[in-house]
Image: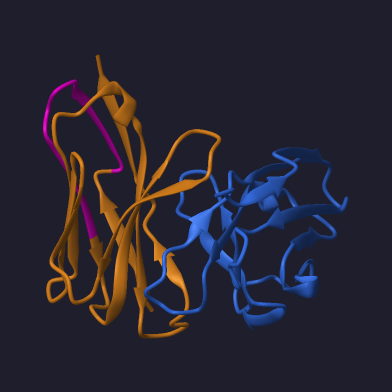
Chain colours: A orange, B blue
């Protein structure tokens, strides 16, 4: 059964810092990995989708990497802004078990202080 | 392009009452998902539809939860009777098809409080 862990659970940084959010998964047989952002009281917004054959994806100030063999992904946020404050969720779609499912981590709650 | 629509946005009910949630996916999306997100946790898949057929409902508590997707477009999720532990945000998502490489797009969710 796939398990996804995100560390840290919460993070507070001053504006302008570069930061890294971590995601690990137990079963490396995955189709893809997706990073989402969730604002309070709102649904999930997809940030980046990395296919299993890819090593990284970039969108603006965001860069996500994937190391399938070690079961790890990182989300790098450059020059953080207060508007980046949100919960960031990592999700993997696996071959094993119910292969149609996305398995989510519990998220990292990010606060960027002005 | 309009996103995934859900209603109501908030609902408060007493335990043992029933409740229903509605979802309208993105136009043209054949696959629809219902997730339950308990506070402090990631979303957990309850049920997945492909058009109007159920693909995966292995984590749906079928003694109290039911869902349907008539005509392969809108969907409703019902809880009857509700328990305190059903308090959560219920998220609906859709994707173009079942291809495992496809992105899922999420609605704003319905926050359910059971008292």
Which residue appears farthest toward the top when viewing the image?
A114
What residue is drawn where x is 41% and y is 70%? B102
Over which residues does the magenta segment extend? A9-23
Q: Where A83 sits versus A100, above or below?
A: above
Q: Position of residue B5 (x, y in %)?
A: 66, 48
As drawn, is A40 to the left or to the right of B12?
Answer: left
Which residue appears farthest toward the bottom when viewing the image?
A96
Q: Does the magenta stretch include residue B75?
A: no
Rendered-image quadrant of the C terminus of chain A:
top left
Q: Where B41 sits versus B99, above or below?
A: above
Query: What secondary structure predominates along the stretch shown in magenta?
Result: strand
Q: Where is residue A86 in the image (x, y as percent from the top left)?
A: 37, 34
Q: Where B103 sits versus B108, above or below?
A: below
What residue is drawn where x is 74% and y is 62%? B74
Rendered-image quadrant of the N terminus of chain A:
bottom left
Q: Does the magenta stretch include residue A14?
A: yes
As drawn, is B92 to the left or to the right of B82?
Answer: left
Which residue appears farthest toward the front when viewing the image?
B1
Q: Where is residue B13 in the image (x, y as percent from the top left)?
A: 82, 41
What residue is drawn where x is 79% and y is 66%? B64
Q: Where B76 sits versus B52, above or below?
A: above
Identify which residue, A105 or B104, lies in the foreground. B104
Identify which residue, B114 or A21, lies in the foreground. A21
- Residue A80 image-quadrant placement: top left
Q: Where is residue A10 in the image (x, y as percent from the top left)?
A: 30, 37
């Amino acid at each position: 059964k796939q398990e996804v862990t995100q560390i840290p659970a919460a993070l507070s940084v001053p504006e302008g810092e570069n930061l890294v959010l971590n995601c690990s998964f137990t079963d490396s047989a995955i189709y893809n990995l997706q990073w989402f952002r969730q604002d309070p009281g709102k649904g999930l917004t997809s940030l980046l989708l990395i296919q299993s054959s890819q090593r990284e994806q970039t969108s603006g100030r965001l860069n996500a990497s994937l190391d399938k063999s070690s079961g790890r992904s990182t989300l790098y946020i450059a020059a953080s802004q207060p508007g980046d404050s949100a919960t960031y969720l990592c999700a993997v779609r696996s071959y094993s078990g119910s292969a149609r499912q996305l398995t989510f981590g519990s998220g990292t709650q990010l606060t960027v202080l002005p | 392009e309009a996103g995934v629509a859900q209603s109501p946005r908030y609902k408060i009910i007493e335990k043992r009452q029933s409740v229903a949630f509605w979802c309208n996916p993105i136009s043209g999306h054949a696959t629809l998902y219902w997730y339950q997100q308990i506070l402090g946790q990631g979303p957990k898949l309850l049920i997945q539809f492909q058009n109007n057929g159920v693909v995966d409902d292995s984590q749906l508590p079928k003694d109290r939860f039911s869902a349907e997707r008539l005509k392969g477009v809108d969907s409703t999720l019902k809880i009857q009777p509700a328990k305190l532990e059903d308090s959560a945000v219920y998220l609906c998502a859709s994707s173009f098809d079942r291809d495992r490489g496809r992105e899922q797009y999420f609605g704003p969710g319905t926050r359910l409080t059971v008292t």
